[in-house]
Image: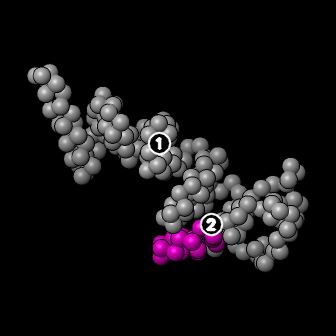
């Protein structure tokens, strides 16, 4: 396998491509069934349609076929990650988010989604790192700023929560999320005043 390029096959499995031949990692050759005749743009549109219809398994398979045509397509990898996440395959989703970031480290939505997966798994430190990466690449990415505040609050970092919620309100002071940020700041102010009185 050292001379072969590893890619995702049509069924979402890893395959080895060497020259014009495609094989499974076991060495079993994979027969081409017209994949070379597929138009990548048509595949991508079909994958998007399947995703919109909630057929996440089909969408993931179609995005995988897009990646056979162009393994560096960060958007197809990101979208496949989203469909796998919806299908409950969170570890596979994380792999595709990381694949998207390998080809486009500025893909802030992939950093954001990786952070969400890490937070769901209770890995707060990893979620912080991923959100910090998203914010470093786009300081005005409000979703990441809000989630960074919420994560700081959840982990007992009141100063961090205060700082991030205040930053969020600089970006958005109209939405329901802004109301939540204001309530968070008010709660922290009351808690701090109570500590001083005590």
In percent of the image, x 21 and y 47: which residue is there? 179
Q: Which quarter of the figure has residue 128? A: top left
Q: Nearer the viewer, residue 120 or 164?
A: 120
Residue 174 in picture, x, y percent from top left: 23, 49
Tell whether position 47 is magenta: yes
- Helix, strand or loop status at disc 1: loop
Tell whether position 106 is magenta: no
N-term-proximal mark, 2 vs 1: 2
Measure the alpha-carbon separation of dots 2 and 1.
28 Å
Dominant SS in magenta? helix
Left-right relation of 40 to 182: right
In percent of the image, x 32 and y 33: which residue is there? 156
Q: Is residue 135 above or below residue 71?
A: above
In percent of the image, x 13 and y 27: which residue is there? 194
Q: Label 2, on which residue? A: 63
Q: Which quarter of the figure has residue 17? A: bottom right
**Residues in magenta, as a range:** 43-63
In percent of the image, x 51 and y 60: which residue is there? 85
Q: Are marks 2 and 1 in contact (CB under 8 Å)?
A: no
Q: Label 1, on which residue? A: 123
- Helix, strand or loop status at disc 2: helix
Q: Is residue 139 above or below residue 85?
A: above
Left-right relation of 10 to 57: right
Q: Nearer the viewer, mark 2 or mark 1?
A: 1
């Amino acid at each position: 396998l050292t001379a072969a390029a590893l890619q995702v096959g049509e069924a979402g499995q890893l395959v080895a491509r060497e020259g014009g031949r495609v094989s499974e990692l076991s060495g079993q050759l994979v027969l081409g069934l017209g994949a070379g005749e597929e138009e990548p743009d048509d595949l991508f549109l079909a994958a998007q349609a399947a995703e919109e219809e909630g057929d996440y398994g089909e969408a993931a398979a179609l995005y995988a076929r897009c990646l056979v045509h162009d393994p560096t397509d960060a958007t197809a990898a990101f979208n496949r990650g989203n469909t796998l996440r919806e299908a409950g395959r969170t570890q596979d989703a994380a792999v595709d988010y990381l694949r998207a970031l390998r080809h486009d480290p500025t893909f802030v939505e992939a950093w954001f989604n990786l952070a969400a997966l890490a937070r769901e798994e209770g890995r707060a430190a990893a979620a912080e790192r991923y959100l910090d990466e998203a914010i470093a690449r786009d300081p005005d990415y409000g979703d990441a700023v809000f989630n960074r505040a919420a994560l700081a609050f959840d982990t007992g970092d009141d100063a961090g929560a205060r700082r991030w919620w205040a930053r969020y309100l600089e970006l958005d002071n109209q939405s329901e999320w802004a109301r939540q940020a204001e309530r968070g700041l008010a709660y922290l102010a009351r808690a701090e005043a109570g500590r001083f009185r005590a």
